[in-house]
Amino acid sequence: MARHRRGDPGVCCQPRQRGRPVIPLTDASRRRVNAPLVAMLLVAANVLVFLLELAGGTAFIRQWALVPSEIVAGRHWITLVTAMFLHGGVMHIVGNMVFFWAFAPEIEDAMGHVRFLAFYLIGGVVAFLVQIAVAPHSTVPNVGASGAIAAVMGAFFVTYPRDRIKTLLLIGWFVDVVYVPAWLLVGLWIVTQVVSQAGAAAGVQDSGVAYMAHVGGAAFGVICARWFETRSAREAGAEPY
């Protein structure tokens, strides 16, 4: 999730895609039972809205992005949902959708289509609310699906911790495909978000990324995922953590 700086209305601050040494691709341990229809529709919706962003420019972003101070004042609550479909640039949406697709199909399979959609949207809203709680007076617009995706990753962390995630490893010019346990990959990602938030709170860094929204979304996923899973998934597919 990114925060749009008013001082630079044409560009939204975004997560550092180029600096990521690992890029999760897919779950290599599990074969899905059902087609991830909702996940595909969510990817399509994000791409469609991004195209509308490009056409509408800054005015479109300011209309539908979330501004914490506005929510606290009781205005523009619809942006709790609309903002999670906005992105700050090509790398922002590509990075988010790659991470989403690496984990979402299996979680949709475990929850079912309708429950997964509800989980995704509620997770995104919770992530925004957590970010608002730490900066209620901020007038900086927030955009991005990262909070909702963090919820999906948190759900994967507790549902399939031992699954191996096919991951692209990037170290300088070295590129390789490795298989990393989900508990390690997602767990380290959550730790980096907590550490980054601590750095931002201490004023050590300011990358324009709403790290607390990531933490809030992941926490929601870890705590609430099992409530959304189907009974058959809990009995047959989910692993104890």
Image (spheres, helix red, strand yellow):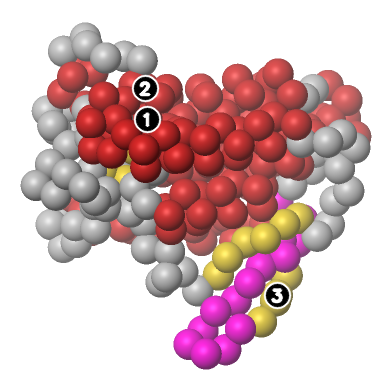
Q: Describe the element under mark 2 as helix, strand or loop.
A: helix
Q: Residue at x 69, y 20 (%)?
A: 115
Query: Vertically, is 47 above or below 178?
Result: above
Report helix, strand or loop for mark 1.
helix
Q: Residue at x 51, y 22 (%)?
A: 122
Indicate the amino acid at tag 1. Answer: Ala
Marks 1 and 2 close (CB-CB < 8 Å): yes
Under mark 3, the amino acid is Val
Residue found farthest to the bottom:
173
Question: Quarter of the image containing the C terminus?
Answer: top right
Which numbered disc flags the more N-terminal residue, 3 or 1?
Answer: 1
Name the side, left or right, on which 40 lies relative to 63: right
Magenta span: 161-175
Give the CA distance from mark 2 to mark 3: 36 Å
20 vs 221, left or right, is left
Cα distance between the residues tagged 3 and 1 = 34 Å
In this figure, which residue is indicated by the disc labeled 2?
A: 80
Q: Which mark is residue 178?
A: 3
| Residue 192 drawn at (x, y percent) | 41, 59
Residue 124 position (above or below residue 186): above
The quarter of the image holding the N terminus is: top left
According to the picture, the residue beneath numbered tag 1 turns out to be: 83
Q: Nearer the viewer, mark 2 or mark 3?
A: 2
For the residue pair 186 and 23, the one nearer the viewer reads as 23
72 falls in the magenta region: no
Mark 2: give few (<14), some (14-19) or many (20+) Cα within 10 Å.
many
Q: Residue 193 or 24: which is nearer the viewer?
A: 24
The residue shown at (36%, 56%) is 15
Q: Residues within 10 Å of mark 3 (few under 14, many from 20)?
A: few
Q: Position of residue 90 (x, y in %)?
A: 43, 54
Name the amino acid type tagged 2: Leu
Camera-side mark, 3 or 1: 1
